[in-house]
Image (spheres, helix red, strand yellow):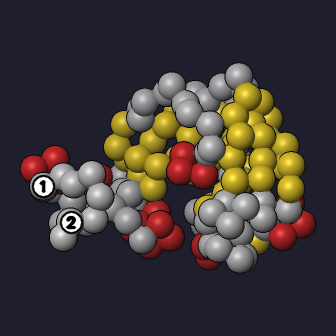
Amino acid sequence: MKYLGSCLCGNIQYEIDGEFENFFLCHCKSCRKDTGSVHAANLFSSKAKLRWLKGENKIKVFNYKNSGHIKAFCPNCSSALPNIQMNGKLLVVPAGSLDSDIDIKPSGHIYLKEKAIWDDNLELVPKYEELPQ
């Protein structure tokens, strides 16, 4: 399977060739900080190949305190981008950076012990198709 992805401004584009083995929603404090949201949504593969189509030389990479919490991003629009971890053994792809549809559903929520206190019963919060008036 091939998947296409890009950053928000379009300066960086990529292709993934292969399948994802896992799809985790991570609630750790680091993921919440770098996404600005309740959790990160990342796809993982030990076999898929990443190929940059445009802008590879522009990508910035941040490794938080050399902890292995790595975020690749576009310096123009700050969108999260794929990165290679664990000495080249693991491809991590922010699900929201994909332009192609995927058929894999999340494998699970992880690091729930660090989840935000406002991350309870979110399924009960009102839902709107667009910004409410």
Please tell me the numbered disc located at residue 53. Answer: none
* Discs 2, 1 touching: Cβ within 8 Å: yes
Kindly identify the residue that appears in the image at 80 percent across and 35 percent down. 49
**Front position in the image: 111 or 6:** 6
Which x, y percent locates residue 44?
60, 38
**Front position in the image: 123 or 42:** 123
Vertical comparison of 42 with 64: above or below = above
- Which structural element holds mark 2? loop
Vertical comparison of 45 with 97: above or below = above
Q: Is residue 101 left or right of residue 75?
A: left
Q: Amino acid at mark 2?
A: Pro
Res. 15 image quadrant: top right
Which x, y percent locates residue 106?
41, 35
Which x, y percent locates residue 35?
47, 66
- Label 2 crowding class (10 Å Cα cut-off): few <14, some 14-19, many 20+? few
Which x, y percent locates residue 66?
66, 70
Please tell me the numbered disc located at residue 132. Answer: 2
Q: Is residue 73 left or right of residue 124?
A: right
- Label 1 crowding class (10 Å Cα cut-off): few <14, some 14-19, many 20+? few
**Front position in the image: 78 or 10:** 10
**Quick one: label 2 or label 1, which is nearer the N terminus?**
1
Kindly identify the residue that appears in the image at 13 percent across and 55 percent down. 126
Kindly identify the residue that appears in the image at 85 percent across and 62 percent down. 55
Choose mark 2 or mark 1, whichever is in front.
2
Please indicate, yes or no, whether residue 73 appears anywhere in the rendered image: no
Image quarter (top left, top right, bottom left or bottom right) of the C terminus:
bottom left
Please indicate, yes or no, whether residue 52 appears anywhere in the rendered image: yes
Q: Amino acid at mark 1?
A: Pro
Vertical comparison of 78 with 91: above or below = below
Q: Which residue is mark 1?
A: 126
Res. 11 image quadrant: bottom right
